[in-house]
Image (cartoon, rainbow, N blue to C red):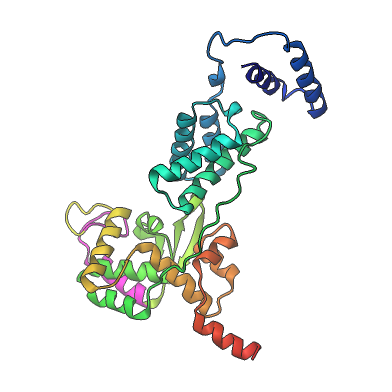
Amino acid sequence: MKEKLIADIEQQMLKVIDNSQLQVLHSTLCVCLGNYDVQESGQLQDDEIEYVDCFLAAKRIEGCSPKSLSYYENTIRKMLEMLEKSVKHITTDDLRGYLSDYQSRHNSSKVTIDNIRRILSSFFSWLEDEDYIIKSPVRRIHKVKTAKTVKETYSDEDLECMRDGCREIRDLAMIDMLASTGMRVGEMVNLNRDDVDFNERECIVLGKGDKERVVYFDARTKMHLQKYLDSRVDDNVALFVSLNAPYNRMNIGGIEVRLRNLGKNLGVDKVHPHKFRRTLATMAIDKGMPIEQLQKLLGHQRIDTTLQYAMVKQSNVKLAHRKYIS
């Protein structure tokens, strides 16, 4: 209890004294309180500042999406509820134990555990930057090493099989749109008819962080998309709507289910909207598109993210070896 009291006093003084003064204060408190027994008479007022809400407000200003903010909040609050400690008193060992216990209880993958570590690191680093704590307890918890798996992409045969298997012109237009633009499915469902420029074969999408960017589609997509729009009898402004009245805007879940069922009927494994994006990135790199241009096309903030999407075919590595080395 005495150490806890000293730590609280140091935290309160952190904003007005430097490190050398903090060391003197620590020594003084230890000496002055050395002959006293300290007992807790009531709960410390650690909730004077709602740290989590302040952190989320900061991330919101930085442009984080509501989905990301919700993920951050759930992850941090679960940790605080489990540890039952003030953020000022959480140690590195506490967090290591929490991550280990979480992995055991939920049988979580290493990727999931590293995502939790990354969010906690962001939270405690923010607390440190704002001088709410002296040092982040996550600083000594290193990135979890995960096995790198080769992500699957669609073959040319898969894409043609799905196109041939579409019974609705809407589904054909959706597949072409995803395959030729590489846009996220969340970006596609938010598109309106007026967002599409058929003359330039391009449209403006709102990506992560509310950042607009231009994406491009090919002639086949233009033809199928125009045919789909001409066939519609509704006045909904949305680019893609349900097949039946009241013709509501399609949502992410609806598109995922539609594509998954299409894949099952055709015998195409793991049909998912995001796989179209990964396929486009791989194809672009394979054909020599500069990675910086692909980064801009996909709307990635960091080029490392683009590299994770794009894979180089092993056959081309063999040809390059013969050309440049053999």
Q: From this viewpoint, is residue 250 visible?
A: no
Q: Which residues are magenta?
A: 220-242
Residue depicted at 62% across the width and 90% down the height:
323
Q: Is residue 206 above or below residue 224?
A: above
Give me the residue at 28% from left, 70% from top.
172
In front of the other: 206 or 98: 98
Which corner quadrant holds the C terminus?
Answer: bottom right
Quarter of the image for residue 192 reads: bottom left
Compared across the picture, whether 68 is left or right of 8 comes to left
Q: Position of residue 158 (x, y in %)?
A: 32, 76
**198 versus 115 height, above or below:** below
Residue 57 position, x and y percent, is: 53, 34
Residue 143 visible within the image: yes
- Is residue 241 found left or right of 80 in the rendered image? left
Q: How many marks?
A: 0
Q: Is 231 covered by the magenta stretch? A: yes
In the picture, residue 13 is in which quadrant? top right
Residue 1: percent from left, percent from top: 61, 17
Please state the horizontal and vertical placement of residue 76, each as a whole percent of the image.
Answer: 49, 36
